[in-house]
Amino acid sequence: MDEMDFRPSAAVSLGVELELQLLRAHDLDLSRGAADLLELLGKRKLPGAVKPEITESMVELNSSVHLHHGSLRDELVVMRDAVVKEAGVLNLRVAGGGSHPFHDWADRRIFPTGRFRAILERYGYLAKQFTVFGQHIHVGCSSGDDAVYLVHMLTRYVPHFIALSAASPFYQGEDTEFQSSRLTSINAFPLAGHMPFVRDWAEFLEYYDKMRGFGIVASMKDFYWDIRPKPEYGTVEIRVCDTPLTVQRAALLGAYAQALAAYHLEERPRAPARAVYLVNSFNRFEASRFGCRGELVEPYESRRKKIGADILQTIETVMPHALKVGGADALTELAADVRHGYSDANWLLECRTMRGSLPDVVREAAARWAGTPAGVR
Amino acid sequence: MDLSFLPQLPFALSAPIMFGALLAAGLLAGEAANRYASLPRITGYALAGVALGPQMSGVLSREVLHALSVLIDLSVGLIVFELGFRFDWRWLKRNRWLLVTAVAESLFGFGAIFGTLVYFGFELVLAASAAAIGTATSPAVVMLVSHELRAEGQVTERTLLFTAVNSVFAYAALTLLLPLLHLELRAGWLEALLRPAYILGGSLLAGVAACMLMLGLARWLGKREDRQFVLLVAMVVLTVGVARSLNLSVMITLMTLGMLARNLDRRHVLMPLRFGYGGQLFFVILFVLTGAGLKFGAWATAAWLVATLLVVRFLGKALAILVFGRLSGVRPGGAGLLAIALLPMSGLAVGMVRDTSALFPVFGQQLGGILLAAVALSELVGPLATQFALRRAGEAHPGGQGG
């Protein structure tokens, strides 16, 4: 049971994982460069870690643990620069965004490790369709009970994270009219969804043992939930975000998660409520389809609100806690984006209108990820 | 009764009949080579050509082959255009060691052949000219094999890049050697200097002009894949035609067009290029016709020299890639495979040998046959090497259909 021992970590410490697209320079389609890129990066000293992901067209950046989103952002910039530089050696481009706009999923190749091969064998084509790119945010908790409480609390904000990160309007060469089409690929997995309504860590372990006993899961990794406790890191992991188009925005999302967690863990303003899970899939759909313009059902007050307005109101509520953990500037920036109707998805859509084709969108997204000013590439 | 509506026998082999029959023959031979002998399809296409050509059955006589040379030029034009279009200056800028490796690959290949020929007592300038011709890797073979396997990865990309570089190197080196050849052989000054200058300069200019026209038209057409595809084909065919009419080099003109189209298109008006099944037609025709034109003659007299040349050429190229490859970011094992993938000698050599021999008959008498025999062998065996290398590198798509 070792792996299920909750290893406490500094409360509201912060870390992120970013899944990135590896692109061919000549046609901007997804490449198969992960192994070569990881080999080159292996020769460099880097903060954090760069790891393989399910297909050869992706790599994952793992940050180290931070107490402040600013240092997280600085570290991500260093990692990003290294990845972009080494990718250049192989004539690959790197980009954020939740989906590749026009790749053909059938062309994807599974990264050859035991676990990924097992996933392909088990899930068939779903494994290749799983070539979507997400940001995972880890927030530290000092106990398993805190983690369970925090999962219940953060579930209320799932539509916020979807709307704020949305960056996958295109899929398989088409405009999906979704702000985040990526979540649809994840919904297909049998163990997607959310954590059951357990009261504390002991009850969670009971549930976990039962699922293991049934042979449905072998480890926590098999749950593809939107938010899940991660005992081995001592964190709660938010998994609904698309990878944003820039590392700066990835750090902003981290700051928002951190402020929300600080607010809930310190003030304990609400008790867990089943109603949150009743409205969850409706809210989730609204957020992935319409982003901040969508509506959510507020489960505690049982009324409808615009997602954007709800985010602005929440930011106001948690601002004192953001001030304490040094995230006030980040939240102000996010709020401004919400007011101006900015989302990475809208940026991509505009890019397509202006430049005229999806390869152009990918090229611009790669330049934006690399932090290259327009015209220098 | 008037039977004049019936065709006269034997009826004439019209162009469509020839074109269709060559396609079908190549296709079937390729499939048979693949099914029954596990050979790459290209080898089958070329074998069909050998069987139909003047060396064997004679269905394709020298006159017919000459008449069909426009098809060869069109195919070569499309292929080198695509190769040029894949050539990315920015990659060489980002990865200086790659540039060093590419140049070294050409130089070492050249040096190895040159040294061997000098060792065997050939005159310096003749040896250098032959070495220049021999340095080029076949664009057609590497393009077709990578298409067939749907190969993708560093070995594939670098094979294409190095092929573009060594093809240009071969042509440029040969052109620069011609004046020296003149001194050696006392040919006419004017022709020896003016001719290469006209061909090289004219081909470059024609490529630049075609590129400007194409970019302008593409911008006006807008970003639609279907329209741009037609535009690309139209421009390539037109440019091949112009290059032929002006007695320029189809290879240099179209390579220039492709390279500039990629690297001068700052506003990205051109969409990524996909010739798809259409390109396949030209590949089949090209290899059947190249096969028909292959000359094995020197095998009878100088087999050992031909074989030695192919081996040292490989060793020279391999040495360059092994020495500099790691610095340019090739993973362990990739360097050797890259050298194997670059084995097939270029069919373009046939044209270069012909042109050089026309100027300097001595060259043709001494070295023409040897080079042509080397080309002949590598057209048949080379595809196997490239296919092996790309497969072994793990870069072939499982759905790819190489043999």
Image (cartoon, coloured by chain):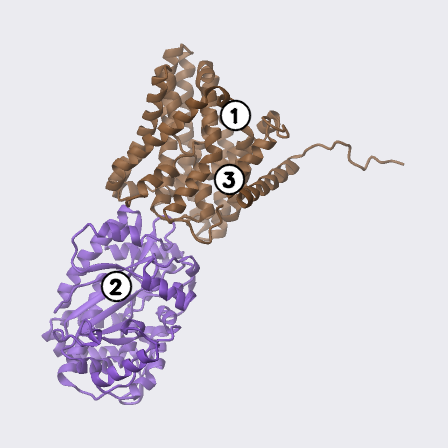
Chain colours: A purple, B brown
- Which residue is denoted by mark 3 in the rendering? B42
Name which residue lies at 20% across and 70% down. Answer: A254
A255 relative to B393, above or below: below
* Residue B306 placement (x, y as % from top left): 43, 24
Image point (44%, 60%), residue name? A106
Please indicate, yes or no, whether residue A374 appears anywhere in the rendered image: no
Q: For the residues carrying marks 3 and 2, which lies nearer the camera in this image?
A: 3
- x then y, percent, for residue B38: 51, 44
Marking on residue B321:
none
Residues at marks 1 and 3, CA–CA distance in whole angstroms: 17 Å
Can see residue B391? yes
Residue position for label 1: B295
Q: CA distance from mark 2 to mark 1?
A: 58 Å
> What kind of residue is marked 2?
Leu
* Residue B114 x, y percent position in the rendering: 34, 22
Callout 1: chain? B
Q: Which image quadrant for residue A170?
A: bottom left
Answer with left or right where residue B94 lies relative to residue B283.
left
What amino acid does circle 3 point to?
A: Ile
Residue A364 lies, with reference to residue A336, above or below; the image says: above
Residue matched to label 2:
A18
Task: Give the Cα separation between the discs numbered 3 and 2.
Answer: 44 Å
Mark 1 belongs to which amino acid? Answer: Lys
- Whether marks 2 and 1 lie on the same chain: no
